[in-house]
Image: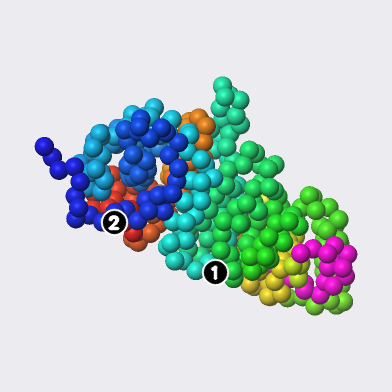
Amino acid sequence: MPTLYSPDVHPVEFLTHFSELCDPRQELKVTYPLPEILLLTLCAVLSGANDWVAISIYGTKKLALLRKFLPFTDGTPSHDQLGNLFAALDAKAFQACFVDWVASLNKTLTGVVAIDGKTSRRSLDKAGGKAAIHMISAWSSEWNLTLAQRQVDGKSNEITAIPELLELLTLKGAIVTIDAMGCQREIAAKIVSKQADYILALKGNQGSLRTDTKLFMKEQAVVNYRDTTVTCHETVEKSHGRIETRIVTVCADIEWLKERHNWPGLKSIVMVHYHAMWQEKTRDETRFYISSMTSDAQHHAKAIRDHWGIENGLHWVMDMVFRDDECRIRKGNAPANFTTIKHAASNMLRSVKGKHSLRSKRHIAAWDDDFLAEMINT
């Protein structure tokens, strides 16, 4: 009879942060304890599994490894059992446990915390009458980590979900950046109340504020800002035959705008002019932002550029490394909970330093048990 559990291996730290998660199953009918299912799923996803079938197969093939951490007395569950449990687990409670785990990593939040949403396209459940899930995530540009996430019913509901997401985080000293959907008074007030700063993109949803900002900045640009005080920062980048120029202009001399709009925490307005040339083509674009900071244009320029790290650092990784847009997990809360597991796996893969890509690290985790153990015990 093989040894079912090795007492020499320390418990997985990640699991301790999910100890308060309520198991929705009837206690007397539980064959596979919740910590075992969470460990199985995490290890399988780290090793390349992207759906319940693959996770179930991983469990049967890697049972000896799994038993080094937890008993797995009755083996591992089928793909149907996995899907049913993750569909029933409370998604908000699951996400709160994730936030608790990230907080335990003792990363002091400085720099940009980017807030943005992503839709898992294949999670559309026509039979169940459910739209594809849309997840709002918070991303630390400094640490390259997902900090938190919150599921919303659709992109239009980001406005209500973002304050809930911000409430989960300790943001003191950070700069929160959000696209135009998040440019709302309630959201700005929430950020300021968390002792953080904000840079919020201005578009048509804040009509009069954007109109006043655009008119003022363009009028002043024509006369070379002689009637106000601004700072400017210009960058020129050349790559693959493309030349990109960005000019960032920040004006903190806006008492008139603050009086007119009474926006929480507003201290400056920002104009970013973007010009690109490649082959015989050109592109010009001007964007406007509001900010709770009075720092110079160079500081604002870096924060605005850092915001877009969430596209490559999180959204692109979810699609290209974890195949998020191909994932057909649809039932109940399973899509949101599985996304949270993938975010945890992404954070763990990044925690292991080295020259290998995240995709390669998933391969190594599948082939090298010691490498996998190092990640889950980080």
Q: Position of residue 326 (x, y in %)?
A: 48, 34
The local secondary structure at tag 2 comes to helix
Q: Quadrant of residue 77?
A: top left
The answer to whether any part of residue 349 appears in the image is no
Q: Quadrant of residue 241?
A: bottom right
Mark 1 secondary-structure assignment: loop
Out of 317 and 84, give the one closest to the viewer. Answer: 84
Residue at 62 percent of width and 52 percent of height: 164
Magenta span includes 253: yes
Q: Residue furthest left?
A: 1
Q: Which residues are magenta?
A: 245-264
- Which label number is shown at residue 110? 1
Is 205 contained in the magenta span?
A: no
Dots 1 and 2: beta carbons under 8 Å? no
| x 51%, y 51%: residue | 96
**Residue 325: x %, y % from top left:** 51, 37
Residue at the spot of label 2: 374
Local crowd at mark 1 within 10 Å, few (<14), some, or many (≥20)? some
Q: Position of residue 153 (x, y in %)?
A: 63, 38
Residue 229 drawn above or below residue 189: below
Instruction: Name the amino acid, label 2.
Output: Glu
Mark 2 surroundings within 10 Å by alpha-carbon count, few (fewer than 14), some (14 through 19), many (20 or more): few
Picture coordinates of residue 258, whole percent (x, y): 83, 68
